[in-house]
């Protein structure tokens, strides 16, 4: 058995050890805080480093529209955005929901789209620089195995679809993603199907290092036929926001 003297010595050692450990922990906390501030980890620093908004797509009923009808340019709330549609099925995209509703907002619905399609938006006065902190935020829902994918049209007219995919979203949910790290495949603007590159191995389809510093259009694609009304298979878009840097079209034209 331990003597009283031994027990007293052990307890004294444990007290001293606890004091030393506490001093080390408290001494490191200011350094961590300083490191986070220097790295932009603080809330204020993170906000100032975010990419600014370039445009927001919201939907409104067009004059004279009643019920679910094919979408038209007048359904885009922002008059400075041009609606672009690729693939025959894009013309089958319908309006849906109720203006002003939070649970079933006025939106667009792909249930009647009989094939793949892409829908993009073009800002009349600007290209968009999506490099660096460029990102997309959207409010979406899906059914079946249908998937939302980002689409960009480059200044040279090349249409690309990205490998970022969001699926299995049974209720409207808002999410966002960065364009950094997205891999891209060419998209046929007439049929809305993916294309090879013709300049690599037979199974190589990725477009290497596309120039996202001057993007003409931004939007989304669904590469599957839909199943009709109901819960079989579709995509449903309530809102889409793009963040990046506006590049005036006049400036790029005059510099040529």
Image (cartoon, rainbow, N blue to C red):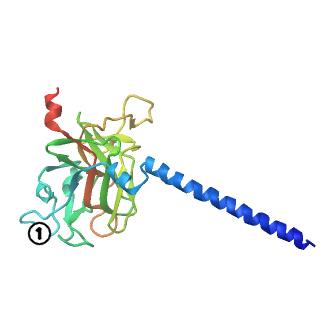
Task: Please give left or right for residue 151 compared with residue 1 in the image.
Answer: left
Q: Is residue 98 above or below residue 211?
A: below
Q: Residue at image x 13%, y 65%?
A: 61
Q: Residue at image x 83%, y 66%?
A: 9
Q: Is residue 137 above or below residue 185?
A: below
Q: Is residue 196 above or below residue 81?
A: above
Task: Please give left or right for residue 178 compared with residue 155 in the image.
Answer: right
Q: Residue at image x 42%, y 29%?
A: 200
Q: Which residue is mark 1?
A: 66
- Residue nearest the observer in this picture, 127 or 222: 127
Which percent across, then down, holds residue 107?
A: 22, 64
- Residue 47 visible in the picture: yes
Q: Residue at image x 6%, y 64%?
A: 63
- Residue 223 visible in the picture: no
Task: Please give left or right for residue 17 compared with residue 36 in the image.
Answer: right
Which percent across, then down, holds residue 147?
A: 36, 56
Q: SS of the residue at dot 1?
A: loop
- Residue nearest the observer in this picture, 222 or 244: 244
Which percent across, then down, holds residue 239?
A: 25, 60
- Give the quarter of the figure containing the N terminus: bottom right
Which percent across, then down, holds residue 42?
A: 41, 55
Instruction: Name, please, the residue furthest toward the right.
Output: 1
- Residue nearest the observer in this picture, 170 or 39: 39
């Amino acid at each position: 058995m331990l003597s009283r003297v031994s027990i007293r010595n052990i307890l004294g050692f444990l007290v001293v050890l606890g004091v030393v450990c506490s001093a080390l922990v408290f001494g490191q906390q200011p350094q961590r805080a300083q490191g986070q501030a220097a790295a932009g980890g603080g809330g204020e620093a993170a906000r100032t480093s975010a990419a600014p908004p370039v445009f927001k797509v919201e939907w409104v009923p067009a004059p004279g529209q009643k019920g679910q009808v094919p979408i038209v340019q007048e359904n885009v709330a922002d008059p400075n955005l041009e609606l672009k549609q690729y693939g025959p099925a894009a013309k089958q995209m319908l309006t849906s929901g109720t203006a002003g509703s939070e649970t079933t907002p006025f939106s667009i619905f792909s249930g009647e789209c009989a094939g793949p399609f892409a829908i993009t938006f073009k800002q009349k006065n600007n290209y968009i620089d999506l490099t660096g902190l460029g990102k997309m935020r959207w409010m979406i829902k899906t059914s079946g195995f249908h998937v939302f994918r980002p689409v960009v049209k480059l200044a040279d007219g090349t249409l690309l679809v990205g490998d970022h995919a969001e699926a299995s979203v049974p209720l409207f949910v808002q999410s966002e993603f960065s364009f950094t790290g997205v891999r891209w495949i060419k998209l046929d603007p007439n049929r809305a199907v993916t294309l090879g590159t013709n300049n690599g191995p037979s199974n190589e389809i990725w477009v290497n290092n596309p120039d996202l510093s001057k993007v003409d259009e931004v939007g989304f694609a669904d590469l599957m036929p839909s199943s009709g009304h109901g819960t079989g298979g579709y995509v449903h878009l309530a809102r889409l926001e793009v963040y990046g840097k506006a590049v005036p079209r006049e400036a790029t034209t005059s510099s040529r």
